[in-house]
Image: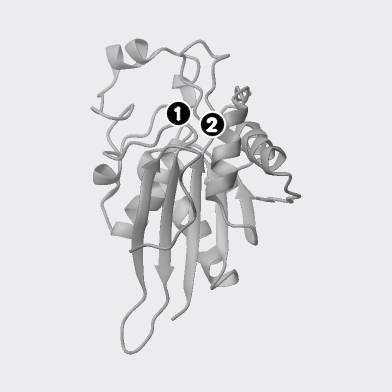
Amino acid sequence: MTVTRWWWIRHAPVTETNGRIYGATDPNATIENPEAYKALDAMLPDDAVWVTSHLKRTKQTAAAIAEAGGRQIAPLEEADLGEQSFGAWHGLTYDEVNAFADSHRFWLAPATHRPPDGESFADLTIRVSRVIHRLTDENAGRDIIAVAHGGSIRAALGVALELTPEDALKFATENLSLTRLDHHAASGGHAPVWRVTWMNRPPASDLTTGQPA
Protein backbone atom coordinates (compact mmCIF):
# COMPACT_ATOMS: atom_id res chain seq x y z
CA MET A 1 0.00 0.00 0.00
CA THR A 2 1.29 3.45 -0.92
CA VAL A 3 1.13 5.92 1.97
CA THR A 4 1.89 9.61 1.51
CA ARG A 5 2.45 11.41 4.80
CA TRP A 6 1.68 15.11 5.21
CA TRP A 7 3.38 16.84 8.15
CA TRP A 8 1.57 20.15 8.64
CA ILE A 9 3.21 22.83 10.80
CA ARG A 10 1.57 26.12 11.63
CA HIS A 11 4.00 29.03 11.34
CA ALA A 12 5.63 30.75 14.32
CA PRO A 13 3.68 33.45 16.18
CA VAL A 14 3.16 36.90 14.69
CA THR A 15 3.47 39.73 17.22
CA GLU A 16 4.23 42.85 15.20
CA THR A 17 0.56 43.40 14.26
CA ASN A 18 -0.37 44.01 17.92
CA GLY A 19 -3.27 41.59 17.83
CA ARG A 20 -4.87 42.98 14.68
CA ILE A 21 -6.13 40.73 11.91
CA TYR A 22 -3.38 39.94 9.41
CA GLY A 23 -4.78 37.01 7.40
CA ALA A 24 -3.38 37.16 3.88
CA THR A 25 -1.08 40.11 4.57
CA ASP A 26 2.64 39.49 5.05
CA PRO A 27 3.98 40.31 8.53
CA ASN A 28 7.07 38.68 9.98
CA ALA A 29 6.99 35.72 12.33
CA THR A 30 8.70 35.87 15.71
CA ILE A 31 11.19 33.02 15.53
CA GLU A 32 13.29 33.50 18.70
CA ASN A 33 12.48 30.09 20.17
CA PRO A 34 15.39 27.77 19.32
CA GLU A 35 14.30 24.92 21.59
CA ALA A 36 10.94 24.67 19.82
CA TYR A 37 12.64 24.41 16.42
CA LYS A 38 15.05 21.76 17.66
CA ALA A 39 12.09 19.80 19.01
CA LEU A 40 10.21 20.11 15.72
CA ASP A 41 13.27 19.03 13.77
CA ALA A 42 13.51 15.90 15.92
CA MET A 43 9.90 15.02 15.09
CA LEU A 44 10.27 15.34 11.31
CA PRO A 45 11.52 12.85 8.71
CA ASP A 46 14.80 13.44 6.90
CA ASP A 47 13.96 12.68 3.28
CA ALA A 48 10.93 14.87 2.66
CA VAL A 49 9.47 17.34 0.21
CA TRP A 50 9.18 20.74 1.90
CA VAL A 51 6.50 23.23 0.94
CA THR A 52 5.47 26.65 2.27
CA SER A 53 2.94 29.24 1.29
CA HIS A 54 4.05 32.43 -0.45
CA LEU A 55 3.93 34.38 2.82
CA LYS A 56 7.22 35.01 4.59
CA ARG A 57 6.12 33.84 8.02
CA THR A 58 5.94 30.28 6.70
CA LYS A 59 9.32 30.61 4.98
CA GLN A 60 10.89 32.05 8.13
CA THR A 61 9.51 29.18 10.19
CA ALA A 62 10.72 26.53 7.73
CA ALA A 63 14.17 28.15 7.69
CA ALA A 64 14.32 28.19 11.51
CA ILE A 65 13.48 24.47 11.69
CA ALA A 66 16.07 23.66 9.04
CA GLU A 67 18.74 25.70 10.78
CA ALA A 68 18.01 24.02 14.11
CA GLY A 69 18.53 20.60 12.54
CA GLY A 70 21.35 21.46 10.16
CA ARG A 71 19.14 20.64 7.18
CA GLN A 72 19.50 21.87 3.63
CA ILE A 73 16.03 22.49 2.24
CA ALA A 74 14.60 24.10 -0.87
CA PRO A 75 10.86 24.39 -0.18
CA LEU A 76 8.28 24.54 -2.92
CA GLU A 77 6.18 27.70 -2.75
CA GLU A 78 2.44 27.23 -3.07
CA ALA A 79 0.41 30.45 -2.95
CA ASP A 80 -2.81 28.46 -2.63
CA LEU A 81 -1.67 27.29 0.81
CA GLY A 82 -1.78 30.92 1.99
CA GLU A 83 -4.04 32.09 4.78
CA GLN A 84 -7.61 33.25 4.16
CA SER A 85 -7.89 36.76 2.77
CA PHE A 86 -10.02 38.87 5.08
CA GLY A 87 -10.06 41.76 2.63
CA ALA A 88 -11.25 44.99 4.23
CA TRP A 89 -10.99 43.40 7.67
CA HIS A 90 -7.20 43.27 7.55
CA GLY A 91 -5.76 45.59 10.16
CA LEU A 92 -8.90 45.65 12.29
CA THR A 93 -9.25 44.21 15.78
CA TYR A 94 -11.49 41.23 16.40
CA ASP A 95 -13.85 43.44 18.38
CA GLU A 96 -14.10 45.87 15.46
CA VAL A 97 -15.06 43.06 13.09
CA ASN A 98 -17.58 41.60 15.52
CA ALA A 99 -19.25 44.98 15.83
CA PHE A 100 -20.54 44.91 12.25
CA ALA A 101 -20.27 41.30 11.04
CA ASP A 102 -21.64 37.89 11.96
CA SER A 103 -19.08 36.14 14.10
CA HIS A 104 -18.05 32.52 14.44
CA ARG A 105 -17.22 31.02 17.80
CA PHE A 106 -13.81 29.75 16.67
CA TRP A 107 -13.08 31.91 13.61
CA LEU A 108 -13.80 35.40 12.34
CA ALA A 109 -16.95 34.54 10.39
CA PRO A 110 -19.09 31.61 9.26
CA ALA A 111 -17.38 29.40 6.69
CA THR A 112 -19.34 30.71 3.69
CA HIS A 113 -19.14 34.42 4.59
CA ARG A 114 -16.88 36.54 2.38
CA PRO A 115 -15.52 39.70 4.01
CA PRO A 116 -15.59 42.78 1.75
CA ASP A 117 -12.90 42.31 -0.94
CA GLY A 118 -11.92 38.99 0.67
CA GLU A 119 -12.68 35.30 0.48
CA SER A 120 -14.58 32.84 2.63
CA PHE A 121 -13.10 29.90 4.49
CA ALA A 122 -14.99 27.70 2.02
CA ASP A 123 -13.09 29.43 -0.80
CA LEU A 124 -9.82 28.76 1.01
CA THR A 125 -10.75 25.08 1.40
CA ILE A 126 -11.21 24.69 -2.35
CA ARG A 127 -7.80 26.10 -3.21
CA VAL A 128 -6.00 24.21 -0.42
CA SER A 129 -7.62 20.93 -1.48
CA ARG A 130 -6.34 21.40 -5.04
CA VAL A 131 -2.76 21.67 -3.77
CA ILE A 132 -3.16 18.67 -1.48
CA HIS A 133 -4.48 16.41 -4.23
CA ARG A 134 -1.87 17.55 -6.75
CA LEU A 135 1.15 17.21 -4.44
CA THR A 136 -0.10 13.88 -3.11
CA ASP A 137 -0.27 12.56 -6.68
CA GLU A 138 3.13 14.02 -7.60
CA ASN A 139 4.87 12.70 -4.48
CA ALA A 140 3.08 9.42 -3.83
CA GLY A 141 4.72 7.39 -1.08
CA ARG A 142 6.82 10.27 0.22
CA ASP A 143 6.77 12.58 3.23
CA ILE A 144 5.59 16.15 2.62
CA ILE A 145 6.38 18.79 5.25
CA ALA A 146 4.05 21.74 4.79
CA VAL A 147 4.64 24.90 6.80
CA ALA A 148 1.39 26.77 6.49
CA HIS A 149 -1.35 28.64 8.36
CA GLY A 150 -4.11 27.96 10.82
CA GLY A 151 -6.79 28.22 8.15
CA SER A 152 -4.87 26.06 5.69
CA ILE A 153 -4.40 23.29 8.25
CA ARG A 154 -8.05 23.39 9.28
CA ALA A 155 -8.92 23.06 5.60
CA ALA A 156 -6.56 20.07 5.25
CA LEU A 157 -8.24 18.37 8.20
CA GLY A 158 -11.60 19.03 6.59
CA VAL A 159 -10.41 17.42 3.36
CA ALA A 160 -9.04 14.38 5.18
CA LEU A 161 -12.19 13.83 7.24
CA GLU A 162 -14.62 14.87 4.49
CA LEU A 163 -16.10 17.59 6.69
CA THR A 164 -18.07 20.65 5.73
CA PRO A 165 -16.00 23.85 5.91
CA GLU A 166 -18.13 24.96 8.85
CA ASP A 167 -17.20 21.84 10.82
CA ALA A 168 -13.52 22.17 9.88
CA LEU A 169 -13.44 25.54 11.62
CA LYS A 170 -13.82 23.77 14.97
CA PHE A 171 -10.25 22.47 14.95
CA ALA A 172 -7.54 24.16 17.00
CA THR A 173 -4.21 24.77 15.25
CA GLU A 174 -1.67 26.43 17.53
CA ASN A 175 1.51 28.11 16.36
CA LEU A 176 4.33 25.60 15.79
CA SER A 177 1.97 22.67 16.31
CA LEU A 178 2.29 19.57 14.16
CA THR A 179 -0.61 17.83 12.42
CA ARG A 180 0.02 14.65 10.45
CA LEU A 181 -2.36 13.36 7.82
CA ASP A 182 -1.56 10.09 6.03
CA HIS A 183 -3.03 9.39 2.60
CA HIS A 184 -3.46 5.66 1.92
CA ALA A 185 -3.79 5.00 -1.80
CA ALA A 186 -6.36 2.61 -3.21
CA SER A 187 -5.34 -0.98 -2.53
CA GLY A 188 -6.87 -4.45 -2.37
CA GLY A 189 -10.27 -3.28 -3.47
CA HIS A 190 -10.31 -0.45 -0.93
CA ALA A 191 -10.79 3.16 -2.02
CA PRO A 192 -8.15 5.75 -1.10
CA VAL A 193 -8.54 7.08 2.41
CA TRP A 194 -6.97 9.58 4.80
CA ARG A 195 -5.93 8.80 8.34
CA VAL A 196 -5.37 11.48 11.00
CA THR A 197 -2.25 10.38 12.87
CA TRP A 198 -1.50 13.51 14.93
CA MET A 199 -3.40 16.75 15.36
CA ASN A 200 -2.25 20.05 16.89
CA ARG A 201 0.70 18.32 18.56
CA PRO A 202 3.09 20.74 20.30
CA PRO A 203 6.83 20.55 19.73
CA ALA A 204 8.48 18.53 22.50
CA SER A 205 11.95 17.08 22.63
CA ASP A 206 10.73 13.61 23.68
CA LEU A 207 8.49 13.09 20.65
CA THR A 208 9.64 11.11 17.63
CA THR A 209 8.49 10.35 14.12
CA GLY A 210 7.35 6.87 15.13
CA GLN A 211 4.73 5.04 13.14
CA PRO A 212 1.15 4.96 14.39
CA ALA A 213 0.15 2.08 16.65
Residue at x 54% of width, y 71% of height: 137
Please name the amino acid that badge 2 sits on.
Answer: Ala
The answer to whether one can see residue 124 in this image is: no
| Image height of 93 relative to 45, above or below | above
Asked if labels 1 and 2 touch by Cβ distance under 8 angstroms, the answer is yes
* Mark drawn on residue 86: 1
Residue at x 41% of width, y 12% of height: 93
Residue 213, position in %: x, y?
33, 64
Please name the amino acid that badge 1 sits on.
Answer: Phe
36 and 30: which is toward the camera: 36
Left or right: 189 as drawn, with respect to 210: left
Residue density around tag 2, few if under 14, some if 14–19, many if 20 or more, within 10 Å: some
Q: What secondary structure is found at the residue carrying circle 1?
A: loop
Residue 18, position in %: x, y?
51, 10
Q: Tally the numbered discs.
A: 2
Residue at x 46% of width, y 46% of height: 207
Quadrant of res 35? top right
196 and 193: which is toward the camera: 196
* Mark drawn on residue 141: none
Residue at x 36% of width, y 47% of height: 199
Q: Earlier in the sequence, mark 2 or mark 1?
A: 2
Left or right: 57 as drawn, with respect to 195: right
* Quadrant of the frame with the N terminus: bottom left
- Residue positioned most to the front: 206
The answer to whether one can see residue 79 in this image is: yes
Question: To which residue does mark 2 refer?
Answer: 24
| Image height of 60 relative to 141, above or below | above
Residue 120, position in %: x, y?
38, 38
Marks 2 and 1, how far apart at CA: 7 Å
